[in-house]
């Protein structure tokens, strides 16, 4: 008989190995899934794990999609460490698109041509303010009325999507757009400078890396970051120390809202160049998985962001190359998270083989 | 007394344990433990916290399966797979921490705990019978949250007795009782034993064991270190068996009290939760260079008072709490620490320290020396601060990088108390300084508190252990039903008097006002 036994100390080795084991198990399950769908399992795995990394263009696309995932997940990691459960990053991302889009459209319509650095910076700031505004609604309701932030933030996602829809079907609709639900194209002066020629990669990826460094420093080298995490790990200890629980709610939500909004603004000022109803590929939700696969650690978030970006791209490729449904990539994301949570049990427990007769043997 | 219990040894012993061993991942909780209890015997199991008493009782009660060893009950080898199996055999247990639902009545709680299908009406009648025959005064209809701690314990004992147990296990039953309630409990237990029930009495209080028990098995580090007749032993000889040494004597010199450091004036606070306690018009004074002890049964307002003093509860009027004459009632814990008020809470893990964080990080909860301008952490200074506390207070730990939860209770308590003492406070408030701490660490902590007092710090100590308060305090007050008694010098205090006051029976106290108010208002 196998038995789960508590470890005296959590295993450091397992904390690192668990995501790797989870990835391997997910690959195995995915192979079984491909076989069950009548496809060659090896070819299926190749589409998800090899093709996204094949060549300069493919790689640049992986990084392009990893950028919003990493940015959003960084903010969420801080939020979750503070025990504030913001599930609505998707909505804050969309408000980032709206905020960034508003700035970009206004500059475009007024015919104001700024230097590119200034223009794109203004757009990004607009996006961050949009994301923060959406997160502030959650923080206010939680702070004043103790409303559950999980439900409020999640429900605001749908409000945000309707807001985007109203804008692009209504006031922001491009007069020359053949009645399509989309805004006019932004002026080139507000777009993010490209990073690599003949790819869609933009400087946003550098901003994301800078955010990784900043978040690492904030979490592990500042008193404020420490206080936030105490609030998450041991609320009574935070009260004893005198760290403000309200401060944790506001900081966590505003930071994660700003990060999600930044990612949204980068999306409209980067590859999309206009506001449309189809701005997000579920980045805000996928980032939650990125956050946990990355162990709520900024460096882990980078690795997990790249991995989940590969799954997103692999899902598109599987659709075109193998004729598999696009939902497959969501299935694999879910599987990965589920298997990871199961593997994490082994950090605090170990599997022991025991015989039931042992206690009787002395009799 | 012990002779009568052992005469019956012609019949098989009620309970016999042979070579019981239980290994946990990091500790061998029981190592080949033997124990024999006769019918009608009150058998003490004596040991420090962590000696393996609780594990052994859980083995007997079926809550834990031993790795090796044999259990005989009334001469028959048994395997006790679960608490239900234990109850079926006739073994009942009263836990140290009560397992009662606050919102249900006493009868409903007892009813829930019974295996057999009795009606609530029948249970209520039986409670009356049992309560009557053992002098256990319990009103079955009262909701549990209105009962005092002693009454709750009686409900637990009645619940255990309704199953007509042949063996009753009591885990540290007196830790929550006033001295008078302890005497009452002992009468009941002697009565039970006289009717043939065997009682396993777990405790670390030597006086009680010598007064009550016929026989005593001493555990240390999971092993049996002695089997004695407690009536023939002294506290010193029992202590030698329990900790391998006699408890170190503390030198307590008369205090040279200085200026008033903490002054509480008319502090009243309404409860924040249904099961909390209202604070009524509390008056306190603590002077530099003295220790003021607060005695009382837990749940009489200690938590609420401490929260108001530490700043965790900031609803008090500013002027109700004065520190060095300055009103601080509305200040946060961080402000109060800057003003010289430090606090050691009763819960170590989760309040005094974050379990998963390192000791170095845990110093940051109350110490900000290593925080540079702009909020940056100086990690090297943080580590050296933690290392200094570990060194100075003899904390056994893997170093500043060890997680708080990897330390034993006594060592973590030394670290937390050390962290606050090392901050050189003007006023140190300590709740349950040695709760669940081994005797050696407890003596060290008490010694450090006295040394801090001699250095001119004002100390306020809340404890449920009267012995401890008598040992270190200069003056004592008692808290009962959210009110605090006037203080008395410890030299004039007796256990009996403090015990009465713990029920609110001081002149003008909550239990005596019923008589007094008529005159006062007339």
Image (cartoon, coloured by chain):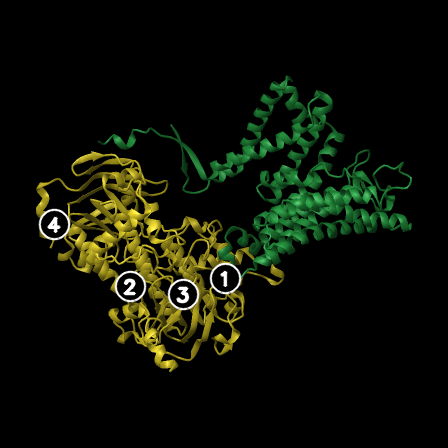
Q: Residues within 10 Å of mark 2 (few under 14, many from 20)?
A: many
Lower position in the chain sequence, tag 3 or tag 4: 4
Q: x, y percentage for residue B303?
A: 42, 63
Q: Quadrant of residue A24?
A: top right
Q: Is residue B487 left or right of residue A115?
A: left
State which quarter of the image contains the N terminus of chain B.
Answer: bottom left
Foreground tag (1 vs 2) = 2
Image depth: mark 1 or mark 3 in front: 3
Q: Which mark is residue B5?
A: 4
Q: Are marks 2 and 4 in contact (CB under 8 Å)?
A: no
- Chain to which the residue tagged by mark 4 belongs: B
Q: Earlier in the sequence, mark 2 or mark 4?
A: 4
Which mark is on residue B301?
Answer: 3
Mark 4 → mark 1, Cα distance in angstroms: 55 Å
Q: Drawn colour of chain B?
A: yellow
Q: Secondary structure at mark 3?
A: loop
Rendering colour (chain A): green
What is the spatial separation of the Cα atoms under label 3 and label 4, in whole angstroms?
42 Å
Marks 4 and 3: in contact by CB < 8 Å? no
Q: Please tell me which residue is depicted at 30% across the width and 35% down the height of the picture.
A: B81
The numbered mark, 1 or 3, whose residue comes first in the sequence reads 3
Q: Give the percent coordinates (x, y) of residue B501.
A: 30, 70
């Amino acid at each position: 008989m196998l038995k789960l036994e508590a470890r005296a100390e959590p295993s450091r080795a397992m904390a690192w190995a668990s995501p790797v084991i989870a990835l391997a198990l997910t690959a195995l399950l995915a192979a079984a899934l491909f076989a069950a769908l009548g496809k060659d399992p090896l070819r299926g795995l190749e589409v998800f794990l090899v093709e996204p990394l094949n060549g300069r263009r493919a790689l640049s696309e992986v990084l392009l999609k990893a950028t919003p995932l990493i940015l959003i997940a960084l903010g969420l990691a801080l939020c979750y460490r503070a025990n504030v459960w913001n599930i609505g990053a998707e909505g804050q991302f969309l408000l980032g698109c709206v905020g960034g889009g508003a700035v970009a459209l206004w500059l475009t319509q007024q015919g104001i041509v700024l230097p590119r650095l200034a223009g794109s910076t203004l757009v990004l700031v607009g996006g961050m303010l949009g994301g923060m505004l959406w997160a502030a609604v959650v923080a206010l309701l939680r702070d004043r009325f103790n409303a559950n932030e999980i439900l409020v933030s999640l429900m605001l996602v749908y409000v945000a999507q309707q807001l985007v829809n109203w804008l692009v079907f209504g006031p922001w609709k491009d007069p020359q757009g053949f009645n399509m639900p989309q805004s006019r194209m932004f002026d080139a002066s507000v777009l993010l400078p490209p990073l690599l020629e003949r790819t869609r990669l933009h400087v946003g990826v550098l901003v994301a890396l800078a955010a990784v460094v900043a978040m690492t420093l904030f979490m592990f080298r500042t008193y404020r970051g420490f206080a936030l995490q105490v609030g998450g790990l041991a609320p009574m200890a935070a009260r004893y120390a005198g760290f403000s629980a309200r401060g944790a709610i506001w900081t966590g939500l505003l930071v994660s809202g700003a990060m999600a909004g930044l990612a949204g603004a980068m999306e409209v000022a980067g590859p999309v160049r206009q506001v449309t109803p189809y701005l997000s590929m579920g980045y805000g939700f996928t980032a939650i998985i990125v956050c946990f696969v990355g162990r709520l650690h900024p460096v882990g978030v980078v690795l997990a962001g790249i991995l989940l970006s590969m799954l997103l791209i692999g899902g598109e490729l599987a659709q075109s190359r193998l004729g598999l449904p696009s939902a497959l990539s969501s299935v694999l994301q879910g599987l990965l998270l589920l298997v990871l949570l199961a593997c994490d049990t082994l950090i605090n427990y170990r599997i022991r083989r025991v015989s039931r007769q042992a206690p009787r043997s002395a009799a | 007394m012990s002779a009568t219990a052992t005469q019956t040894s012609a019949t098989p012993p009620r309970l016999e344990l042979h070579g019981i061993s239980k290994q946990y991942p990091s500790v061998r909780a029981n190592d080949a433990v033997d124990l024999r209890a006769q019918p009608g015997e009150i058998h003490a199991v004596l040991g420090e916290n962590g000696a393996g008493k609780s594990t052994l009782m859980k083995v007997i009660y079926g809550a834990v399966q031993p790795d090796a060893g044999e259990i005989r009950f009334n001469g028959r080898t048994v395997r006790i797979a679960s608490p239900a199996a234990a109850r079926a055999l006739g073994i009942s247990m009263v836990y140290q921490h009560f397992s009662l639902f606050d919102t249900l009545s006493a009868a409903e709680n007892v009813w829930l705990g019974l295996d057999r299908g009795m009606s609530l009406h029948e249970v209520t009648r039986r409670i009356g019978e049992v309560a009557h025959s053992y002098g256990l005064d319990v009103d079955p209809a009262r909701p549990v949250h209105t009962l005092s701690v002693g009454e709750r314990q009686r409900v637990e004992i009645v619940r255990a007795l309704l199953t007509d147990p042949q063996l009753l296990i009591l885990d540290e039953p007196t830790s929550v009782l006033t001295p008078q309630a302890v005497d009452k409990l002992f009468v009941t237990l002697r009565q039970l034993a006289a009717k043939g029930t065997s009682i396993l009495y777990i405790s670390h209080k030597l006086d009680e064991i010598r007064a009550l028990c016929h026989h005593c098995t001493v555990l240390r580090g999971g092993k049996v270190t002695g089997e004695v007749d407690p009536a023939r032993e002294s506290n010193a000889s029992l202590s030698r068996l329990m900790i391998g040494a006699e408890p170190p004597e503390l030198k307590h010199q008369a205090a040279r009290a200085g200026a008033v450091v903490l002054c509480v004036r008319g502090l009243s606070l309404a409860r924040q939760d249904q099961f909390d306690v209202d604070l009524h018009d509390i008056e306190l004074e603590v002077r530099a260079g003295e220790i003021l002890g607060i005695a009382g049964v837990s749940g009489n307002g200690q938590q609420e008072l401490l929260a108001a003093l530490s700043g965790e509860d900031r609803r008090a009027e500013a002027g109700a709490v004065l520190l060095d004459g300055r009103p601080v009632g509305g200040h946060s814990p961080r402000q109060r620490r800057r003003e010289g008020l430090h606090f050691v809470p009763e819960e170590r893990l989760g309040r005094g320290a974050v379990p998963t964080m390192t000791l170095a990080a845990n110093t940051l909860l109350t110490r900000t020396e290593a925080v540079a301008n702009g909020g940056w952490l100086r990690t090297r200074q943080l580590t050296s601060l933690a290392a200094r506390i570990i060194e100075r207070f003899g904390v056994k730990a893997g170093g500043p990088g060890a997680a708080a939860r990897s330390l034993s209770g006594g060592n973590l308590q030394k670290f937390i108390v050390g962290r606050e003492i090392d901050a050189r406070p003007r006023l140190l408030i300590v709740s349950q300084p040695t709760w669940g701490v081994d005797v050696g660490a407890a003596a060290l902590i008490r010694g450090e508190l006295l040394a801090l007092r001699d250095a001119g710090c004002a100390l306020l100590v809340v404890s449920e252990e009267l012995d401890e308060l008598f040992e270190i305090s200069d003056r004592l007050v008692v808290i009962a039903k959210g009110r605090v008694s006037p203080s008395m010098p410890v030299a004039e205090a007796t256990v009996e008097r403090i015990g009465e006051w713990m029920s609110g029976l001081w002149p003008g106290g909550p239990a005596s006002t019923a008589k007094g108010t008529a005159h006062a208002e007339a």
